[in-house]
């Protein structure tokens, strides 16, 4: 080891640091191995290697002493003299350092994986739920950090008796009108406490678990609000259905009135026209006007628009009132029926009020014009039940009804508004 004497001073400093690290690493490896195995014989190899590192440090101490005093002496102790290459010593120390670090890491992993009272406490503290175990009299055996924080939030301090703590929780829940196992904290979170008795080796223990149910509680409250809204909507729907029966009855009554007005108005107008023209009505005319009158009034069905229009023209034609037609009825059945109703009402009014003998009906798509050769009304007309009902029907279809009185009486209907 004479090469040590030729090294510069920084090399001595680095070698000293290497020796110190080797001794520390090997001492830690020996301690950890003894702690992990619990037997001294398992730590003997590490003790021998530690002794080798200490021996190397003593030899190095002789080198430093000789360097400082200026006397070069052979290395060794007593009769033992050592002559080893310095770089071999450095390599051996590096190997000892690497082995010591490896043994330390391996022993640490083994200790960390072992189940101990400390590891159990750390594992229980890492749980997101609160955990508490106590004896039947309330003496707490174990409580994790989460449960202790919940104790502070709910009671203001860490409790020492589990039974008293659960009693205070139940009391605070009743005061806040919550279930006995539900507690709401000041930060807005909601916790559910579950108390269970455990039997272990013929002994009874009390387990108290606190679970965060904030999301579930909010969802439950939302569902409850929706149920209340649904119940309210259900009551409103029941009231609406009850009103629908009344509205349906009123609509049926209104339809019956309109049908009676149309049928009776048409026949009475024909009779009125016959009387006005001073014609003597024969029995066939009277029979045609009164035949099946009640059956037609009671009948809920209606002929097709084309048949209804032909029947209307024939009825008025038999009394000498011509209904000339230009164009065709709309293909839409609802509009076609409405056109027939308007033509019937127009013909009835023309014969009754205007004493007309000829009517011109012009149909083009959704447009309808009805004109007659009777004299125009002397005064402003007032829409009664007939024209009023026609206007309601037209406006219900999104159309428009226009009444022209000069120079002649014209009904102008436009149903094209609902097609846009």
Image: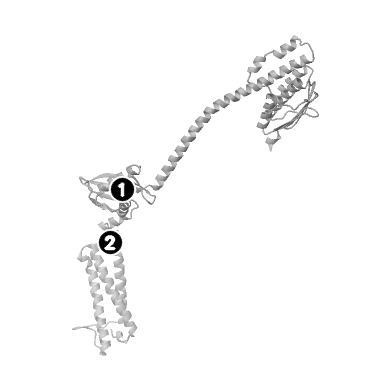
Identify the residue shown where x is 65% and y is 15%: 295
Q: Position of residue 165 (x, y in %)?
A: 27, 48
Residue drawn 47% across and 35% down? 232
Left or right: 345, with 240 as reference point: right
Q: Is residue 12 above or below residue 373?
A: below
Q: Secondary structure at mark 2?
A: helix
Residue 361, horizontal then vertical, whole percent: 77, 27
SS category of the residue bearing label 1: strand
One can see residue 88 in this view: no
**Residue 252 vertical position relative to residue 84 in the rendered view, above or below:** above
Residue 41 occupies which quadrant of the picture? bottom left
In the rendered view, does 203 fall on the left or right side of 303? left
- The quadrant holding residue 91 is bottom left
Q: Residues within 10 Å of mark 2 (few under 14, many from 20)?
A: some
Quick one: label 2 or label 1, which is nearer the N terminus? 2
The C terminus, quarter of image? top right
* Residue occupied by mark 1: 209
Relative placement, left or right, of 193 versus 264 is left
Which residue does the image show at 28% across and 64% down from the upper left?
107
Instruction: Tell me if label 2 and label 1 are in contact, CB under 8 Å.
Output: no
What residue is rendered at 74% in x and 9% in y? 283
The label nearer to you, 2 versus 1, is: 1
Q: Residue 327: percent from the left, percent from the top?
A: 77, 29
Structural distance between the alpha carbons of marks 2 and 1: 29 Å
Locate the N terminus and report the quarter of the image it occupies: bottom left
Q: Position of residue 180 (x, y in %)?
A: 32, 42
Q: Is residue 32 above or below residue 246?
A: below
Residue corresponding to mark 2: 111
Checking the image for residue 374, the label placed there is none
Residue farthest along the front direction in this orientation: 379
């Amino acid at each position: 080891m004479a090469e040590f004497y030729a090294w510069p001073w920084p090399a001595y400093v680095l070698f000293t640091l290497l020796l110190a690290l080797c001794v520390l690493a090997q001492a830690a490896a020996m301690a950890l191995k003894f702690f992990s195995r619990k037997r001294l014989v398992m730590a003997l190899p590490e003790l021998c290697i530690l002794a080798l590192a200490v021996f190397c440090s003593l030899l190095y101490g002789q080198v430093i002493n000789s360097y400082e005093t200026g006397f070069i002496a052979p290395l060794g102790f007593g009769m033992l003299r050592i002559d080893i290459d310095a770089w071999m010593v450095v390599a051996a120390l590096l190997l000892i350092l690497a082995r010591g670090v490896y043994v330390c890491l391996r022993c640490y992993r083994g200790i960390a994986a072992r189940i101990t009272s400390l590891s159990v406490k750390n594992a229980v503290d890492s749980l997101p739920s609160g955990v508490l175990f106590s004896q039947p009299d309330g003496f707490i055996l174990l409580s994790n950090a989460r449960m202790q924080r919940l104790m502070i939030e709910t009671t203001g301090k860490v409790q020492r008796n589990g039974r008293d703590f659960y009693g205070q929780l139940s009391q605070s829940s009743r005061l806040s009108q919550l279930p006995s196992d539900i507690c709401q904290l000041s930060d807005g979170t909601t916790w559910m406490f579950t108390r269970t008795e455990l039997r272990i080796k013929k002994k009874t223990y009390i387990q108290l678990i606190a679970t965060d149910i904030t999301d579930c509680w909010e969802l439950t409250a939302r569902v409850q609000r929706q149920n209340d809204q649904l119940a309210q909507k259900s009551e409103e729907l029941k009231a609406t259905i009850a009103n629908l029966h009344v509205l349906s009855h009123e609509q049926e009554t209104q339809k019956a009135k309109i049908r009676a007005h149309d049928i009776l108005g048409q026949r009475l107008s024909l009779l009125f026209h016959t009387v006005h023209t001073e014609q003597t009505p024969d029995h066939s005319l009277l029979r045609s006007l009164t035949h099946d009158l009640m059956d037609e009034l009671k009948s809920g069905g209606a002929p097709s628009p084309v048949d209804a229009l032909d029947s209307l023209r024939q009825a008025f034609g038999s009394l000498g009132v011509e209904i000339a037609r230009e164009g065709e009825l709309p293909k839409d059945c609802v509009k076609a029926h409405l056109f027939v109703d308007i033509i019937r009402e127009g013909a009835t009014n023309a014969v009754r009020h205007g004493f007309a003998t000829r009517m011109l009906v012009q149909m083009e798509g959704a447009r309808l014009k009805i004109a007659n050769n009777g004299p125009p009304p002397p005064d402003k007309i007032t829409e009664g039940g007939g024209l009023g009902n026609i206007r309601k029907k037209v406006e219900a279809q999104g159309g428009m009804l226009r009444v022209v009185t000069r120079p002649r009486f014209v009904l102008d209907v436009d149903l094209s508004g609902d097609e846009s």
